[in-house]
Structures are given as C-alpha cells and as structure tokens.
Amino acid sequence: MDPADRAYFFDEGIRFECTRCGACCTGAAGQVLVSEVEIEAIATTLGQEIPAFRKAFLRKLPDGVSLREKTNGDCVFYSAGSCTIHRVKPGQCRTYPFWVKNLRNGGAWEKTRRNCEGIGRGHLHTKNEILEVLAEDLEPDLET
C-alpha cells in the first residue's frame, strides 16, 4: 500500500515553524548523524580541511559519525541562540520534528510538541509534504 493512501493522525496536516528556540540543539547529549556529503559541506563552509574538521567537530559511533557536543550537551554549532552552520546543517536537523519516531502516533507527536514551541505555529505542512520528508525511512508500521 502506498503510504499516501493510509490514514494518519496528521492527515489534516501539522503546523510547524522553527522559532530557533534551541530546544532541539541544547540540553542532554545526543547524536546528530552526518553523511560524507554533509561533512564536506560543513567543512567547506567553515573554511576547514576535512581531516581537521573531523578531529575538531566529529565523533565516531558504531553506526556512523556524529557531530560533537559541548560539555553541557549542546550542539557544538549552537551559539547565542542560533545555528552557526544553519545554511548547511545536517539533514537530521533540517527535517526535525518530522522524524518517524515523532510521527509514529499522536502520543509520540504530543510528547515532541511539549518540547518544541514551533509545533502548532506557522506553515501548515500537508500530509504529502510530511510523507516526502519521511520517504527515505518511513516504517510500514506507522500507526494511525
């Protein structure tokens, strides 16, 4: 079945506009996975050679490479209320909050909404727009 033909709790769309509050960039440490293309784009934007960039800003994980965090858990590229690499930020950051784990069901979305002041504001993202963001990793068992 085509995912667009299924019913989801977001069939009528979801309003979201990033307020740049930093809630998703700060706090407890996490993982921001980056691809080789993203590493090259960020290093180039910062005017750094890739080996030096890797040493300064990345950490190796069993399943990939992640941006480092500051000692307080904040993203290393979050400073004074903004993302210093906003123009080339990783896909994981660009697609937040429209992640499979957040859209699994209405309860998961409500939990995400409590931590993100941008949910419920701004542009109404249609079901099809949301499914486009999810297209690469949409799980077939996404609940309605």
Image: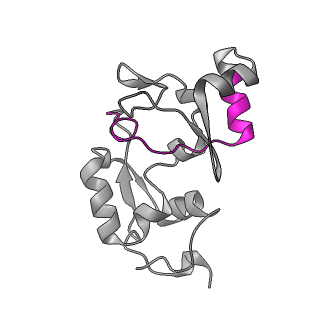
Task: Identify the image quadrant of the C terminus.
Answer: bottom left
**Where is 35 relative to 100, above or below?**
above
Stretch of the chain drawn in magenta: 21-43
Residue 41 in the image, given as x and y percentages of width and height: 70, 29
Residue 4 highlighted magenta (yes or no): no
Q: Main secondary structure of the magenta part?
A: loop
Residue 143 in the image, given as x and y percentages of width and height: 43, 79
**Where is 128 relative to 68, above or below?**
below
Residue 86 in the image, given as x and y percentages of width and height: 52, 28
Residue closest to the far top: 47
13 sits left or right of 140 in the view: left
Task: Identify the image quadrant of the N terminus.
Answer: bottom right
Viewer-proximal residue among 71 and 117:
71
Residue closest to the far bottom: 1
Residue closest to the far left: 114
Residue 29 highlighted magenta (yes or no): yes
| Residue at point 73%, 30% (across, down) | 40
| Residue at point 40%, 36% (across, down) | 25
Total marks in image: 0
